[in-house]
């Protein structure tokens, strides 16, 4: 093993700011590339006896080497260990106010130049939507349930099936042997524990009491993206804040690659790292690579995706707190990660599968289908909606939603599936069975359920016919409160009498359309304006 100290790239450094002017009074921060939170010293002499003095960078809190008023400083001798050549430097440069100017990762003195990744912190994007778990459920005992939605998350083209939780941030476990609770306590006002990072409004608290047995998994799952192909083999950096207040102090971070329903490859769980929390808040940062998906197969439903799981200790009591799990492309994490809640709301509250909008468009917006009373299904289903666009793998989320959510008595044609309903939405979609969209043409939208004094109407159902014979045969006994019907159309006993065609309406109406009570009206409401309806896939 040989440790040497090298000048690179020049004996004396001159650094400009982002506008090209001298970075007077700026700072050079030097860290280990394998752990960008840990300082790796730079020296004034070639023997490594005198490290440069490090001072606190204003508005940042970490330490750096102060540059002179000309943006210059040096000489800098960088340490190099031949036995650990991967132990290189991660450099950050700040102006006099602590504003980050640029970073270089994998800087090696022997090479005299920057390494493989150069980036700017302001361009780092956290790929875990809603990592502060905004709009969470509050306090919920979960002892009798193996699945619980905690907060909204990424949802585009993801859908919940028996094989995968799909969209949203969820708690999942294999049995109910544990007495456990999830809550979201708030930080005290003025708490800046995470400084210089932003301290969120609240955090996830997991409490497990008793002695659970037979647990094989128990985790919180965060959706990252639809499509396991998107990030395969990419270097990523993961960070999370956590602490333990009692019991087992460990959690396990792991990737979950879901290859989709309908014959996809076996789902892959890849451990990333076990973390041991302390009794005070601590930030952990890990660099890793998203597992390769070469040689795998995507299922016929196309709902594959990548997820991050935070697994708690199994068969063990504990009180664990964590927040802000984050994932970034590359091997850098920013010191501060913050989004205003309006921005988070814009993502988690964007239209989801099954959402409907109306308008005078003749064709649907991308990701929607016009509700044309047609059918949807797989590409081989022969589905007819939107001139055949309903026959596509991307209709599965809507197919799955309708199959599982709307009421499905055999008399309701809206939920009919070619050949009859099978065991599940996945089975029917994979068998290329088409499903009819809820009927919408010439119909007005109404809210399902049973309002006060009204009948109960099922989700996705339809009512109303223009065929007088069918209308009469299906009309239940009912009353019509209101103003008096003119005697010219009122028969004896409260019945509506047949009216001659020269009077313009209700010609030969059968006498069994009865008003319950004398002289009560029979009201007919005629819609006067029509638009198109479109439904989100």
Image (cartoon, rainbow, N blue to C red):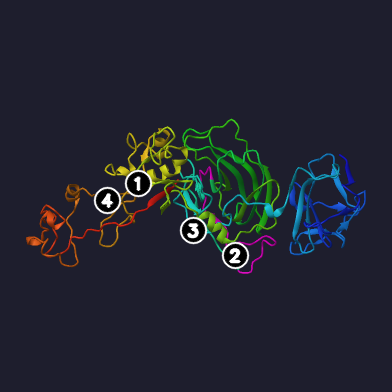
Looking at the rendered image, the disc whose residue lies closer to the viewer, 1 or 2, is 1
Q: Residue at x 93, y 48 (%)?
A: 46
| Residue pointed to by mark 1 | 438
Residue that extends furthest to the bottom in the rendered view of this protein: 189
**Distance between mark 3 and mark 2 Cα atoms:** 16 Å
Q: Please tell me in which quadrant of the rendered image residue 130 appears.
A: bottom right
Residue 55, percent across and down? 82, 62
Residue 122, percent across and down? 69, 55
- Mark 1 crowdedness (10 Å alpha carbons): few <14, some 14-19, many ≥20: many
- Point out the tag, 3 or 2, that comes first from the N-terminus: 3
Q: Determine whether, in the image, residue 375 is placed left or right of residue 323.
A: left
Looking at the rendered image, the disc whose residue lies closer to the viewer, 2 or 4, is 4
Q: Determine whether, in the image, residue 478 is placed left or right of residue 50.
A: left
- State yes or no: residue 130 in magenta: no
- Mark 4 crowdedness (10 Å alpha carbons): few <14, some 14-19, many ≥20: few
- Identify the magenta region: 189-217
| Residue pointed to by mark 4 | 463
Secondary element type, mark 1: loop
Secondary element type, mark 2: loop
Q: Is residue 97 visible?
A: yes
Residue 123, percent across and down? 68, 52
Mark number, residue 137 = 3
| Residue pointed to by mark 2 | 187
Q: Residue at x 38, y 45 (%)?
A: 402
Q: Determine whether, in the image, residue 462 is placed left or right of residue 508.
A: right
Q: Determine whether, in the image, residue 122 is placed left or right of residue 16.
A: left
**Distance between mark 4 and mark 3 Cα atoms:** 36 Å
**Distance between mark 3 and mark 1 Cα atoms:** 31 Å
Looking at the rendered image, the disc whose residue lies closer to the viewer, 3 or 1, is 1
């Amino acid at each position: 093993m040989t440790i040497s100290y090298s000048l690179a790239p020049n004996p004396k450094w001159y650094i400009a700011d982002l506008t090209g002017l001298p970075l007077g009074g700026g700072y050079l921060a030097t860290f280990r590339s394998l752990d960008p939170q840990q300082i790796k010293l730079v020296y004034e002499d070639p023997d490594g006896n005198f490290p440069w003095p490090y001072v606190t960078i204003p508005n940042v809190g970490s330490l750096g080497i102060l540059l002179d008023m000309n943006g210059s400083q040096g000489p800098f001798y960088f340490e190099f260990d031949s036995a650990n050549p991967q132990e290189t430097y991660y450099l950050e440069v700040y102006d006099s106010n602590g504003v980050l100017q640029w970073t270089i990762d994998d800087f090696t003195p022997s090479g005299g130049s920057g390494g493989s990744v150069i980036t700017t912190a302001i361009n780092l994007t956290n790929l875990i939507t809603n990592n502060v778990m905004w709009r969470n459920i509050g306090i919920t005992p979960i002892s009798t349930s193996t699945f619980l939605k905690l907060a909204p998350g990424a949802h585009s083209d993801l859908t919940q099936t028996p094989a995968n939780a799909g969209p949203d941030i969820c708690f999942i476990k294999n049995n109910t042997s544990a007495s456990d609770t999830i809550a979201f306590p708030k930080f005290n006002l003025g708490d800046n524990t995470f400084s210089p990072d932003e301290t969120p409004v609240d955090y996830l608290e997991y409490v497990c009491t008793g002695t659970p047995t037979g647990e094989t998994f128990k985790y919180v799952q965060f959706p990252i993206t639809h499509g396991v192909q998107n990030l395969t083999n990419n270097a990523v950096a993961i960070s999370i804040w956590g602490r333990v207040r009692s019991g087992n102090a460990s959690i396990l971070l792991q990737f979950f690659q879901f290859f989709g329903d309908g014959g996809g490859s076996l789902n892959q769980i890849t451990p990333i790292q076990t973390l041991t929390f302390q009794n005070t808040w601590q930030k952990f940062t890990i660099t890793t690579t998203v597992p390769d998906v070469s040689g795998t197969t995507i299922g016929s439903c196309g709902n594959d995706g990548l997820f991050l799981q935070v697994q708690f200790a199994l068969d063990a009591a504990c009180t664990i707190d964590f927040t802000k799990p984050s994932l970034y492309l590359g091997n850098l994490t920013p010191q501060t990660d913050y989004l205003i809640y309006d921005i988070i709301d814009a993502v988690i509250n964007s239209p989801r599968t099954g959402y409907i909008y109306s308008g005078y468009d003749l064709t649907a917006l991308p990701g929607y289908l016009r509700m044309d009373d047609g059918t949807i299904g797989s590409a081989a289903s022969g589905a007819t909606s939107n001139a055949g666009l309903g026959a596509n793998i991307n209709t599965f989320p809507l197919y799955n939603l309708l199959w599982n959510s709307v009421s499905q008595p055999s008399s309701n044609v809206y939920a009919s599936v070619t050949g009859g309903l099978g065991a599940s939405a996945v089975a029917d979609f994979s068998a290329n069975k088409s499903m009819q969209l809820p009927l919408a043409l010439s119909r007005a939208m109404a809210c399902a359920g049973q309002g006060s004094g009204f009948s109960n109407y099922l989700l996705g159902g339809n009512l109303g016919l223009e065929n007088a014979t069918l209308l009469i045969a299906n009309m239940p006994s009912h009353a019509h409160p209101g103003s008096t019907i003119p005697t010219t159309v009122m028969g004896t006993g409260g019945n509506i009498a047949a009216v001659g065609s020269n009077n313009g309406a209700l010609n030969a109406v059968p006498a069994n359309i009865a008003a319950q009570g004398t002289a009560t009206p029979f009201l007919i409401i005629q819609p006067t304006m029509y638009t198109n309806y479109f439904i989100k896939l």
